[in-house]
Image (cartoon, grey):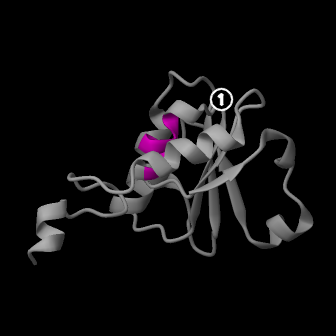
């Protein structure tokens, strides 16, 4: 998962606009989006306690088969990164008071999981013994 400092993320640049980046809030139904040509979707967490963007990411990955990048923006804390990765996020823009080094350590702490998730649907035993 790519980690981005808050200070490094701003309004979309002309290059990002050429990539066809969608920035959507957490009330948008992913089923209503036209995803043709979209290379990145930024999902917004207005508060760290609001988990609707996890559901959006999961729907985009598993049901809508979105292959582009999914970024988490807004009130993103280090504590959320593992679940974000498992829900289908590729990158996270950390809240201004969050440390990149602590975030990297958090992601390195867990390399694999027994359960399936948005990016690896098969549980570990099925991957090992298939």
Tally of numbered discs: 1
70 on left or right of 125 = right
Where on the picture, by quarter, is residue 121?
bottom left
Give the labeled residue for mark 1: 75
**Residue 15 on image: x %, y %:** 86, 70
Q: Is residue 29 visible?
A: no
- Is residue 25 depicted above or below 49 in this figure? below
Question: Is residue 82 rendered magenta in the image?
Answer: yes
Give me the residue at 71% from left, 61% from top: 21
Q: Is residue 55 left or right of residue 14?
A: left
Q: Secondary structure at mark 1?
A: loop
Is 88 or 78 nearer to us in this picture? 78
Q: Is most of the magenta stretch helix, strand or loop?
A: helix
Looking at the rendering, which quadrant does residue 116 occupy?
A: bottom left
Seen in the image, is 29 located left or right of residue 99?
Answer: left
Rendering coords of residue 3 (x, y %): 66, 51
Quarter occupied by the N terminus: bottom right
| Residue segment shown in magenta | 80-85
Does the stretch in magenta take in 97? Answer: no
> Residue drawn at (82%, 65%), measured in percent from left and top?
17
Q: Position of residue 13 (x, y in %)?
A: 89, 60
């Amino acid at each position: 998962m790519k980690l981005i400092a808050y200070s490094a993320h701003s309004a979309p640049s002309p290059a990002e606009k050429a990539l066809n980046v969608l920035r959507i809030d957490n009330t948008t139904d992913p089923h209503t989006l036209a995803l043709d040509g979209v290379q990145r979707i930024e999902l917004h967490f207005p508060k760290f306690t609001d988990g609707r963007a996890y559901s959006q990411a999961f729907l985009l990955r598993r049901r809508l088969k979105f292959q582009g990048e999914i970024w988490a923006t807004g009130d993103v804390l280090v504590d959320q990164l593992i679940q974000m990765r498992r829900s289908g996020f590729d990158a996270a823009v950390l809240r201004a008071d969050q440390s990149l080094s602590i975030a990297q350590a958090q992601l390195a702490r867990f390399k694999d999981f027994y359960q399936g998730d948005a990016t690896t649907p098969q549980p570990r035993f099925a991957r090992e013994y298939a």
